[in-house]
Amino acid sequence: MKIYEFTEQFPDETSCKMHFKAVREQEGIICKGCGSTNHYWLQSKWQWQCTNCRFRTTLRSGTVMHSAKLSFYKWYLCMAFMSSTKKGVSALEMQRQLGHKRYRTIWVLMHKIRSGMGKRDDRYTLEGMIELDEGYFEKTTSIHTPLKRGRGSQAKTNVAVMAESTALEDLETGAQSSQFRYAKMKVLASHKSSEINDVATQNISRTATLITDKSTSYEEFSKLFETHLSFKSDKETTRTTLKWVHVNISNAKRNLLGVYHMMAGKYLQNYLNEFCYRLNRRYFGENLFNRIVVATVANN
Ligand SMILES: [Zn+2]
């Protein structure tokens, strides 16, 4: 959404709250007391009341903003900025744009939105033909230590990167190629093969065809998935068979370094959530803003 459109559609706090109410009702409100989905709206209290047990649900409760004090207006403006740029916005830039006093508040807000994006993408599993490889992302231990560019002694975080693609064949030449569809990136806490097995089975359909290199970490994939194809890791494989997973790894690294300049290891997953969320919705155009609002309505 462009900022001038935002100011037209959302001139004040009430317009943001009304929009959020509508999005939540569309997604469905689940009563924390009894699990019922039937509610009526108490306008004077800005709360829903369960028709079954009378338990009340506030606009924010059960969403990523449940304990936040920031106004809906700033929260919405932040999502509008996030959706208006192709590459993302740093918290410092966001703080400046929002004219907010405290950096930390904006930083937390953006991470909450990113965490909502991750939860939303977790609802989907990759299907069909999946390339899988691991990427090594540099990390810093403090959010105040900027990342150094190039080779350094910094610790690296291991990330499982998965890319769903479809095979294409040129009808005239018969040349094989593939088209990229969706990606997932998951920080791995260890190098154990049990962990990569868990991440793969949580994110990829069992009926998928997995394409990896010959690393021993993937030995059990043939038992876990319908088809597992492994190829020798070399330049040719990187360019062809595992093309999309490598394109995504290098784009993610460039994006994270370029926009955020720093990423503490602990928060890397959130930055990757935002990167994949945008990537998977790259054709959404103007609808991206609405989808980000939906992502902040958790219920998950
Ligand atoms: Zn209830």
Image (cartoon, helix red, strand yellow):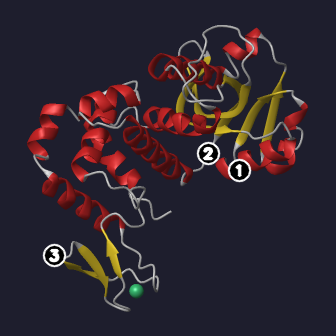
Determine which residue is flagged by label 1. 207
Dot 3 and dot 2 residues touching (CB under 8 Å): no
Establish whether ligand 1 lies closer than 8 Å to the Cβ of label 3: no
Q: Residue furthest bottom?
A: 52
Viewer-proximal residue, 232 or 6? 6
Marks 1 and 2 in Cβ contact (< 8 Å):
yes
Is residue 17 or residue 120 the one in the foreground? 17
Mark 2: which amino acid?
Glu
Count the marks: how many?
3
As shown in the figure, which amino acid type bears the numbered disc 3? Gln
Image position, residue 121 (x, y; %): 51, 48
Dot placed on the residue nearer the N-terminal end, 3 or 2: 3
Q: Position of residue 41 (x, y in %)?
A: 22, 78
Element under label 2? loop
The residue labelled by disc 2 is 127
What distance separates the C-alpha of mark 3 from that of mark 1? 48 Å
Identify the mark nearer the N-term, 3 or 1: 3
Residue drawn at (74%, 32%) of the image: 211
Amino acid type, label 1: Thr
Specify the quadrant of the image occupied by residue 193: top right
